[in-house]
Image (cartoon, rainbow, N blue to C red):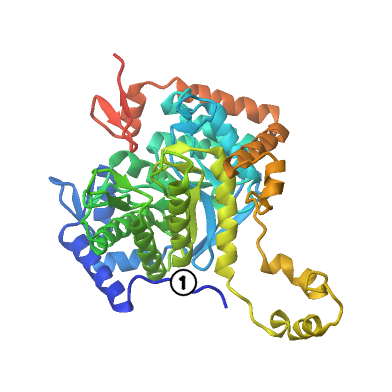
Amino acid sequence: MKLNKIDVFSKNELEQIHAASLELLLDVGIKVDSEKARALLKKNGAEVNEKTHFVKFSESLVKEKLKTVPDSFTLHGPDGTYKATIDVEHTEFATIGTPVKIYDPDHKKGIRKTVMADTINQIRIVDSLEHVICSHIDVWPNDIKYTALHAHCIYQWVKNTKKPYGLGCLGRLASQDMMNLTSMIVGGEKELMNRPRLVGFMNPTSPLHLPQIMTNGFEVFAKYRQPTIIAPEALAGTSSPVTLAGLVTQTNAEILGSMVLSQIYNSRAPIFYGTVSHVTDMRTGNSAMGSIEMGLITAGIAQLARYYNIPSRGPGCGTDSKLLDMQNGYERLQTLMLAAQAGINYITCAGTYEATLVEALELLLIDDDLIGMVKRAMEGIKVNDDTIGLDVIKKVATTEQKGVNFLAEKHTRTHMKQELYFPKLSDRNRRSTWYKKGEKDVITRAGERIKELLESYQEKELPKELDQKLIKYIRDVEARNFDDYKKAEDLMVDSITLPDGIEIKDKK
């Protein structure tokens, strides 16, 4: 049988958390910065306080909108040939993080700032992986103007991979750019809406807050039916109660409130019920992504997603280590395995360390291998007359011929590829053979394979007319001024703080 899913809540406990979340939504509500979003919520039956900007949601409104959330959808690559279905039954894997630094063993500190060449390399490596279906903007280039970064990444995505791509809901203007550029690439808005290419990220701010910039982008992703991850990043003990049940209750309310808004924007807009929540280390005040509690929170979110029949997203391979060391390894595996055993449908997990702040291309290959191992574990042990193999056991055990074992048997040849996982990077040689091959560790072996993959990669050549249109659009994005952002995002301020904390100011 297959490996059983782990549950951290009983049926009664799930009901208790659901009821408590509904109480929060009804008694307190969620602070919604966007005036437009508040007006839409009010029109659909929510109670809006225009002084505090808090919006209260009735149980009936939540239940009504839950009915229209799809339980499955399919992601496509830029040319439409690659596809991956996300549903409530199966598990797929993708990358994670927004690093601005990258592992570089040739640098004196072992890391350096990321540049666009690193972003391109990351997209290309993910394209080659067996188990990772989607890259996101997981390498944020420091040599590109921040307000044009999304446009440059879309351009490199179409030239360097057959797989779908993920981006943050970085405001109305940037999100519309993403849709415009991708529509040009795939042959129009209708094609983009019918066969989604992009994954969005909507992160409510805990506790109970939908920030304006990200909410604006969320509307665009919903309008174009691009599947969007709703994932609060609450930290137990600082931005949520220290109790995990309290954190899950609070973030459940944040997700449900965001879900209602998504379905008001566009009925049947696809979403992921997600999390990237973890805990605060009470000794340092720092977040702890490699904690065992992050795995428990993720398991709880998986159960709630099944309760609402919505595809789930959760993190794996989380680590707080600053090195490619043993801590990095054991934290990666514990969070990945818990997410998989919990039944998360879309596990974002590959390529980063130091709380997702640093990228390592080598980890992309290692994580792909880890995912392969976890997928094999989740298959469990298949039991039938053929796999029990009584005939071959009797034959080998009773032969009088010396040196006979199971290696030469047809039964072994028939079943070995299904029964055994063959890791690509693990060294299983004897020590003497390992010495002869240069005494290389897994990071060195991964680095050599990265070099081979990148040297042999052939960038896709775009049709000349399309290439020119995309380049012109990017130049127009780069030419925008601060007033363009103020107008697009409905802001009356002298600066904009983006969801990741970066501030854009008028240079006047």
State the image coordinates of residue 108 (x, y, percent, origin top left): 48, 24
Q: Nearer the viewer, residue 322 or 498?
A: 322
Q: Amino acid at mark 1?
A: Lys
Q: Single out the residue that lies furthest toward the right.
A: 401
420 left or right of 34 in image: right
Q: Which residue is mark 1?
A: 5
Q: Residue at x 54, y 33 (%)?
A: 119
Residue 297 in the image: above or below residue 165: below
Residue 205 in the image: above or below residue 372: above
Q: Single out the residue that lies furthest toward the left.
A: 51
State the image coordinates of residue 462 (x, y, percent, origin top left): 68, 32
State the image coordinates of residue 246 (x, y, percent, origin top left): 23, 61
The quadrant where residue 383 appears: bottom right
State the image coordinates of residue 346 (x, y, percent, origin top left): 49, 57
Q: Locate the N terminus and report the quarter of the image it occupies.
A: bottom right
Q: Nearer the viewer, residue 427 or 250?
A: 427
Q: Nearer the viewer, residue 424 or 497?
A: 424
Question: Under tag 1, what secondary structure?
Answer: loop
388 left or right of 272 in image: right
175 left or right of 384 in image: left
Residue 19 in the image: above or below residue 222: below
